[in-house]
Image: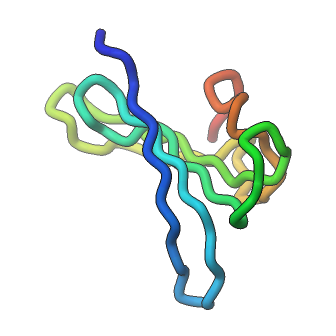
Amino acid sequence: MAQSVLDQRRITLDGGGIYICMIQYDANENPIYIGLAVPGTATSDPLWQIRHLTFDPSNNPTSIQYANGVIDFNFVWDNRATLSYS
């Protein structure tokens, strides 16, 4: 499997909030982790909202789950692979 790729973007949500968006892609170029935080947040700070996406063998999305099943901004992006998602 090829090494995953990280992408960082700045986005504005409908409510006017500006966030940085970190995206980790798998070898098939599917986004498997998406993290949101306010600009200036370190990836080691517990201030991230993290989502995990899964895909079927045809690369169609099958689920979007949040870290610990909540939409809170209190997770560490660097720990995304070891968090539980639901």
Left or right of 2 in this view: 6: right
**Quadrant where the image shows the C terminus:** top right
The count of marks equals: 0
**In the image, is residue 52 above or below residue 36?**
above
Residue closest to the far left: 58
Q: Residue at x 62, y 69 (%)?
A: 19
Which colour style is shown? rainbow
Q: Quadrant of residue 31?
A: top left
**In the image, is residue 38 above or below residue 47?**
below
**Residue 50 position in % (x across, y down):** 64, 47
**Residue 37 position in % (x across, y down):** 69, 60
Q: In front here: 40 or 30?
A: 40
**Residue 62 position in % (x across, y down):** 34, 42
Q: Residue at x 45, y 37 (%)?
A: 6
Q: In front here: 59 or 79?
A: 79
**Quadrant where the image shows the N terminus:** top left
Q: Quadrant of residue 2?
A: top left
Q: Quadrant of residue 54?
A: top left
Left or right of 58 in this view: 50: right
Left or right of 12 in this view: 1: left
Q: Residue at x 78, y 58 (%)?
A: 73
Left or right of 30 in this view: 13: right
Residue closest to the far front: 40
**Residue 40 position in % (x across, y down):** 74, 60
Residue closest to the far bottom: 15
